Image: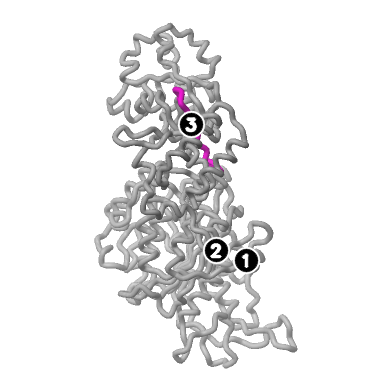
Amino acid sequence: MNRHEIARRKRALGQFFTPPELARQMARGLWEDWQAGQSVDGAALPTSLTPPTSPTSSNLSAGPSLLDPACGDGALLRAAAEEWARRLQCPAGPDNPGEVVATAPARPLPRLSGVECDPMLVTRCRSLWPADLAMGLDLARESITPPTPFVHWGDALTGPGFDDADARDDSADPRAPGPGFAPPIDWKVTFPTEAAGGGFDLILGNPPYLRERGHRALFESLARTSLGRRWQQPRMDLAHYFLHRALDLLKPGGCLAFVMSVYWTRADSAAPLLERLRTETQPLEWIHLGNRDLFPGVQGHHAVFRLRRCLAGSTEAAGGPQFARLRTVDTSGPLEAAWQAAEVRTLPVNEFFDAILEPTAHRVRLAIRHPVAPVASRPDAGVLEEEFEVRQGIAENPPRITRAQRRTWPDLPPVGTGVFVLTTDELRQLGLSPAEETLVRPYHRPQAIQRYHLAPQPVEWLLYLTRQTAPRLAECPAIARHLARFQSLLEVRREVTRGLMGWWHLHWPREERLFQQPKVLGIQMGTAPRFAFVPQPAYTGFSTHVIVPRSDTASRPLPVLTALLNSQGAHDWFAARAKQRGVKFDLSGGLLRRFPLPARDADQEQAIEALVRQAARQPDPRLDQELDRLVRPWWS
């Protein structure tokens, strides 16, 4: 298998392996958390796992069990084994700085286990680990043997778990075969000791990163498993399932450490998962890693979080602290040094989950010190959807030919050729009749939407073909000749195959009134919100929001809404709640509908409306600053 095939396989399985330096930090923190929950003679042990001076004292409980449910190349298990062994070395003496001066007493080895669905990685881990671990440790004088993990080939998400709720056998309904197909794991059979003991003591993980988009068959099959029947949500990530499974397998009082991207905490699909974390766990630490380049090919912010499972029937973890820690790791320099040097803040456990909903370290501090958008708590405050409709732009499908389409249909015209969205030159070359010209609409890309204003002249044009505007293609001969070049692509679209529209129609054209009437246009993704007041007809694509007044209620003027959405207060509100996509954040329609609106002030609205209309005609940074000054009191 060459490197390109390996890369494709890793993408298909969502494999992004844990860097060794990150694995070491995660393993170190997890062992410390577990140690803090143990006791000797009824007294809490010190945080350090260095053995006490008495050689007969034990600083580790007998044989703790540790699981990585998606172990990949085994980096986390390797780090856990090495860290355990290192912590049994005696400290250096005054006469032997840096030297090991004593032999640690024999102790029961922890049981380290992994589950992996990729048989190639399972074979690699099983064959290389003993030598691999020995190379990483200098323990010849120690009588300390690092525990050798055992990796099971199987699917951690299918098959019955430890709980009675999972008793139904899912083996007859496994995940769809594919590059990640593996037999279901029956957790009670595979791990009888842990099942009898109430679960694993420790769980360590870097779950696969796969979104539902592009993997529908996988997620549909998962929804039919017992795990999916309990926790399936629209548009959830595969990592959500792994965290649910880990919570099911973790012993009450046990500790967990996961590394994941931070945006999941603000996803609607994660709401049941966040509720489980609030009610079933006690947070210990959240380590924000920023946009440090940890996983090649993956953008965005990541975080490590550690928690302890609450005792059965209790909302508190065993002997755990009542405060959680927040650590912000600098994105420059070696990870270990930055991790150790990072500022650590503490806050009450009951405030922890509100704090981690913020996408960056700056906003974590903002959430703790300066809660954003206080207007939302006023009794007279409403939300945007009470006064306005929020809709997405048109889904042309496709606007232009893409590389992926060209690979599937090699006979298509070159990449970039307009299908429903055309440049001025492409439109001129069609030679449309006067009747066909009535089907052409001005089209604006997201880049044309700026703060308060829209680019005055469109650079592209949309063929607005719907069941109402173009019921019969024969009446549009020039357009028919143009679209015939793409017919093989257009005929396989879902709505066409279901007989809901003609193959020449736009996929989702929306109601045309949305684009003809005055409106506010906004981008869905960017480094900052951008909303423009657009009084003239303008058509936009799927990655934009179209906001129009509701017909059944009295709405404030659209220019006033534009000023509110472009304000600094709105920026902070969105930044604290939107999904993080690299350096950008994703403003969903659901989030926009929940945007808080202040009580109305007729005099203030009149002044703001006049300035916004002026900014829509003639952009001026001074107008932008003046508008933010006028809106600011509404956020105080």
Q: Residue at x 51, y 64 (%)?
A: 286
Question: What whole-number distance in Å separates the C-alpha atoms at marks 1 and 2?
Answer: 9 Å
Q: Are marks 1 and 3 in contact (CB under 8 Å)?
A: no
Q: Residue at x 42, y 68 (%)?
A: 350
Amino acid carrying label 3: it is Phe
| Residue carrying label 2 | 287
Dot 2 falls on a residue whose secondary structure is strand
| Residue carrying label 1 | 342
Q: Residue at x 30, y 74 (%)?
A: 313
Dot 3 falls on a residue whose secondary structure is strand
Position of residue 625 relative to residue 103, above or below, is above
Position of residue 626 relative to residue 260, above or below, is above
| Residue carrying label 3 | 533
Amino acid carrying label 1: it is Ala
Q: Is residue 193 magenta?
A: no
Q: Where does the magenta region start and end?
A: 526-538
**SS majority, magenta:** loop
Identify which residue, 99 or 558, lies in the foreground.
558
Position of residue 307 relative to residue 474, above or below, is below
Q: What numbered label is drawn on residue 280?
A: none
Where residue 167 appears, x then y in whole percent?
25, 64
Amino acid carrying label 2: it is Ile
Where residue 464 appears, x then y in whole percent?
40, 20
The answer to whether 192 appears left or right of 283 in the picture is left
Where residue 562 appears, x then y in whole percent?
48, 37
In the picture as drawn, the residue positioned furthest to the front comes out as: 603
